[in-house]
Image (spheres, rainbow, N blue to C red):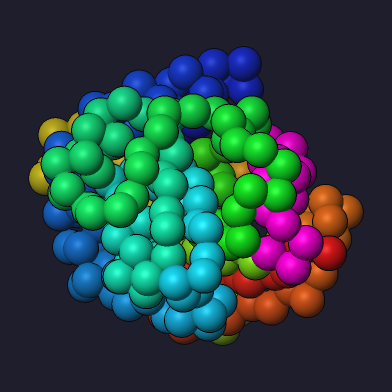
Amino acid sequence: MSALPKPEEKAREVRQMFDRIAPGYDRLNRVMTGRMDQRWRRDLVRRMGIGPVDRVLDLACGTGDFAEIAREAGASVVGLDFARQMLLGALRRRIDGVAFVQGDALHLPFADGSMTAAVSGFALRNFVAIPPVLAELARVLAPGGRIGLLEVDRPRNTLVRAGHGVYFNHAVPFVGGLLSRDRSAYRYLPQSAIYLPGEREFVEMLVANGFHRVQKRSPMFGAIQSVTAVRR
């Protein structure tokens, strides 16, 4: 049975879902990935060369994982999310020097060219549409600004893909639903991968919206994609 919302209801339903699962979201992420999710974030921040001179946007920041790591690298950081409960979780972390804002990725409340870098973790498939979000990121980034995006992916190796399919499509909904007591949310999360474009299409989206020097790494045997690009 599909857990995917109707297109016209996606924004509202996804926001409500993340508000519901916010209290246990970090704990479940660590369980589901064996804490590898933090390693992927740190590696991406390092690859982007984020440091004290940067103004970083953590888009769809959730409870602030990326924001905290970018701040540890010395950057000034603002995290944006549309789910209020996620932002309250981020605020409870009391990350010095990070501002958190509730807002819409399709209408970022930041001036043109005001950021030098932007990161986002496992959020692309939750947006109503990806190209307008990329266009907004290009708008708020200064020329030469960098983006770093983490998302799920489909392994290319046949055996790995089969094993990953069992884990991602069956174990994740079962364990996530059991621990969170929100089975619908953890049915949606694996199924939402259908919203993701293929590799070539995604590169074309990035280029069409003002980015170049697109690079992709594939940790976890290709089950994760770690993409960087630079604003022209």
Q: Residue furthest front?
A: 53
Q: Residue furthest right?
A: 208
User: Which residue is depicted at the point 58% across and 31% down?
Assistant: 109
Residue 132, relative to residue 15: is it above or below? below
**SS majority, magenta:** helix
x and y, in percent, of residue 166 in the image? 37, 63
The magenta span reads: 129-145
x and y, in percent, of residue 39 in the image? 32, 77
Quadrant location of the N terminus?
top left
Residue 184, relative to residue 92: is it above or below? above
Please tell me which residue lies in front, 11 or 113.
113
Please tell me which residue lies in front, 95 or 27.
95
Q: Is residue 149 visible?
A: no
Q: How many marks?
A: 0
Q: Is residue 118 left or right of residue 24?
A: right
Residue 50, relative to residue 167: is it above or below? below
User: Which residue is depicted at the point 56% across and 76% down?
Assistant: 48
Q: Is residue 229 left or right of residue 209?
A: left
Residue 79, relative to residue 227: is it above or below? above
| Magenta highlight on residue 13 | no
| Magenta highlight on residue 135 | yes
Q: Is residue 212 left or right of residue 104?
A: right
x and y, in percent, of residue 85 in the image? 25, 29
User: Which residue is depicted at the point 33% across and 50% down?
Assistant: 98
Quadrant location of the C terminus?
bottom right
Q: Is residue 2 left or right of residue 125?
A: left
Q: Is residue 115 visible?
A: yes
User: Which residue is depicted at the point 22% across and 53% down?
Assistant: 95
x and y, in percent, of residue 167 in the image? 33, 64
